[in-house]
Image: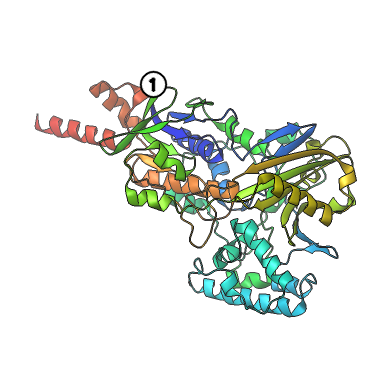
Amino acid sequence: MDKYDVIVVGAGVSGLLAALTLSKHGKKVLVLEKKSKLGGNCNSYMVDGFQVDTGAHAITHLQAGPLRRLMDNYFDYQPVFEDYGNYFIRTEAHFMKVPSNLKDFVTFDVLPRKDRVILSQAITKALTLSSFGFDLSKQSVYDSLPKNLSKDTFDFVDTISGFLSGRSMKETSAQRILSGSSFVRDSITQEQFDSMIGKLETKRRQSTESILASVLPYNLHASLKTRMNRVSKPFISLERLATNRVHYSQGYPRKGLKSLLNAILYSLPDSVKIKTECEVKQILVREGAAFGVEADEIYEADFVIHTGFASDLPKLIKDLPASYVEKLKGIVHTKSLSIWLGLDQELPEFNYTGSEIWFKDFPYWAMPISNYDSSLAPKDKQLVGFSFVIDEKKAEAAEKKKAYQTIFRALPDIEKHIEMKHEQIMIPEKAAVTIDGHFAEIRAPIKNLYIAGTDTDRRSMGITRASYSIIELLKILNEDGKLYRSRFLSFSVCKRLDWSWDSAPSFDKFFRAETFYLHNRRFS
């Protein structure tokens, strides 16, 4: 039976990032995935000649966020990101940019002028309180607003809340709106990363314009790298009232979402083994500590990282503390519907890069992703994704029908140009950011068991949130003495104690053995 340093349960983006980073720290890693495909919601596939993603995605915080830190420190190959573009609002009478600062609100004719003034005042107040350290994470967006706003304004705010948290404005915190709208930015500098994780050995890094750039046609949009290289003055939160851009440092990967997945897979060293269609049935615990898993066979490791739904842990581990199980029940999930439409031509309604929001009745968030890369659709055709937050209590067929009706209401001419339809129903993140929703701790109440993924970190969304989680995981593993081990000394210790190098000990076990050896040598 092979022994591993770490077993990672789940091969979504969180599990693969955990495997990549830990393997680059010298760990022998086994990844077990119950499905046949890797990447989870970070993937793309073909449908009738169109390449669809698993849900519409915008990759955020690309300048100094968590994914940037992971790419710069661990990736051997990096995808090329296109500038995301802008966010727009579509109504029957308007198509205009989503306001992201007070200046934009002045001309935002979608909402009544009186409401724009009230919203500007509410944002200013919330941002001022946040800047002075007040915790707004338990104050709902709804409670932060006066109640004399028009229905359109409440619908607009409710829609923005829904796409940032997965829930209504009554369940979404004011802090989530500030961070999701980029008024509050929570980036990670390389210096911060080094202080948390420890400085990694200098390695030859490939530039962001990866090897893919030399073989893929360069389209009309400038690469996001040109923006990343600019040195700009850092703004404090209050200054962003006048200067904020909601699409700040965001991008979309050329060749689609699978290019990011491929960059992770290409960067994995030989010390990572991945098994698909291998469902973990039980996490094995002995004397209060995890020591492996039961899947198609028994696998043992120094520690286990679970990257599936944290709420599933009670099914995998017997005798979890009752209080912990109760907390896991408080994790809130949101169900989403993505509808991909392949169009027989490029429509003028989608002559933009970025995304649009329809906020009336049944809100959607839409992206014409073939505008970033024309290869995602057949020649002279177009691919657009529409995402909806759906009611998990209602029949899926009814929600799909309602979604199509909304699309055809917003875009009456689109129906006659559809040549491909494809629907996806999924849970986009493992936990919704709500006022009362619970998030799991990375350290589980079982020794040597850790949790990673989008239900362990509240910051940002999707892949960016998963990346935050992985950096926090690395930080905690470093604190627990499980991230690094001394190769120089462990060779001698292994030789003296008859340990094979392939199963070299964790640093704390090795340190105890080395101390014991030196102590005996001193007094012998």
Let me know if residue 224 appears in the view.
Answer: no
Classify residue 101 by image quadrant: bottom right
Q: What amino acid does circle 1 point to? A: Asp
- Density class for disc 1 (Cα within 10 Å; few <14, some 14-19, many ≥20) is few
Residue farthest to the left?
A: 524
**Residue at 60 percent of width and 46 percent of height:** 428
Classify residue 234 by image quadrant: bottom right
Let me know if residue 105 appears in the view.
Answer: yes
Q: Which residue is mark 1?
A: 2
Q: Position of residue 294 (x, y in %)?
A: 40, 27
Circle count: 1
Nearest the eye: 28 or 415: 415
Nearest the eye: 172 or 39: 172
**Residue at 72 percent of width and 54 percent of height:** 365
Nearest the eye: 430 or 124: 430
Q: Position of residue 39 (x, y in %)?
A: 59, 36
Q: Secondary structure at mark 1?
A: loop
Nearest the eye: 284 or 150: 150
Q: Is 225 rendered above or below residue 34? A: below
Query: Is 47 on the left or on the right of 273, as rendered?
Result: right
